[in-house]
């Protein structure tokens, strides 16, 4: 199985934290952009609105990439568990049962984080940069993720 399952799950948590940090930074930059627009005093030490938009969009892209990497690791873990379970006797499958539950819960969390990131990324493209096609793509991806979650998870 290459790396141990526990190591890969720890890596998923790391990617989630990176994604959440980038997501939060993007949000804060978006809020600060509004403050810049309302500011009467030009201050060269403060980022311009265009700089804030670029950094905000970059942070949403970092968050998206981090959440997708976490999803990729989780898919790999699921596949490895299924392979091992297929090759073992039913009584021996118990050793992965705690990992299976944790992996499924992480997968739902990552999908929710990813959907939220696409909403903000879409808003950023739509309202701040007039990139309507890109915004629609983000919103469609959000809807796809929510539909996917609705099939797997009954409580949203």
Image (spheres, rainbow, N blue to C red):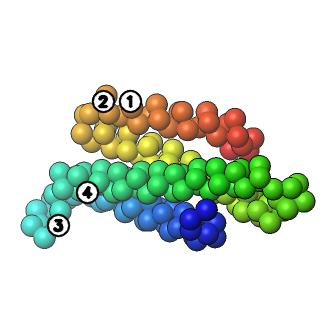
Tally of marks:
4
Q: Is residue 17 left or right of residue 80?
A: left
User: Do the numbered discs 2 and 4 sit on residues whose CB atoms are within 8 Å?
Assistant: no
Name the outermost residue toward the right: 91
Q: On the image, numbered disc 2 is attached to which residue?
A: 132
Question: Which is nearer the N-term, disc 2 or disc 4?
Answer: 4
Question: Which is nearer the N-term, disc 3 or disc 4?
Answer: 3
Q: On the image, numbered disc 4 is attached to which residue?
A: 55
Q: CA distance from mark 3 to mark 4?
A: 13 Å
- Name the image quarter holding the C terminus: top right
Q: On the image, numbered disc 3 is attached to which residue?
A: 46
Q: Judge depth for marks 3 and 4 and give the one in front.
A: 4
User: Do the numbered discs 1 and 2 sit on residues whose CB atoms are within 8 Å?
Assistant: yes
Question: Which is nearer the N-term, disc 1 or disc 4?
Answer: 4
Q: CA distance from mark 3 to mark 1?
A: 31 Å
User: Do the numbered discs 2 and 3 sit on residues whose CB atoms are within 8 Å?
Assistant: no
Q: On the image, numbered disc 1 is attached to which residue?
A: 136
Front residue of 18/43: it is 18
The 10 Å Cα crowd at callout 1, few under 14, some 14 to 19, many 20 or more, is some
Helix, strand or loop under label 2: helix
- Name the image quarter holding the N terminus: bottom right
Question: Which is nearer the N-term, disc 2 or disc 3?
Answer: 3
Q: CA distance from mark 2 to mark 3?
A: 28 Å
The residue at the point 47 percent across, 35 percent down is 141
Front residue of 13/22: it is 13
The residue at the point 27 percent across, 42 percent down is 128
Q: Position of residue 50 (x, y in %)?
A: 17, 51
């Amino acid at each position: 199985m290459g790396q141990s399952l526990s190591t890969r799950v720890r890596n998923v948590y790391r990617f989630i934290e990176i994604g959440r940090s980038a997501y939060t930074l993007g949000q804060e930059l978006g809020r600060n952009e509004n403050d810049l627009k309302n500011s009467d005093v030009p201050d060269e030490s403060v980022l311009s609105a265009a700089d804030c938009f670029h950094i905000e969009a970059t942070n949403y892209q970092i968050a998206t990439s981090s959440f997708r990497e976490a999803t990729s690791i989780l898919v790999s873990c699921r596949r490895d568990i299924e392979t091992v379970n297929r090759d073992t006797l039913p009584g021996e499958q118990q050793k992965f049962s705690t990992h299976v539950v944790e992996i499924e819960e992480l997968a739902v969390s990552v999908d929710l984080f990813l959907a939220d990131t696409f909403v903000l990324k879409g808003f950023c493209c739509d309202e701040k940069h007039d990139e309507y096609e890109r915004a629609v793509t983000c919103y469609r991806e959000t809807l796809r993720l929510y539909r996917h979650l609705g099939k797997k998870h009954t409580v949203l």
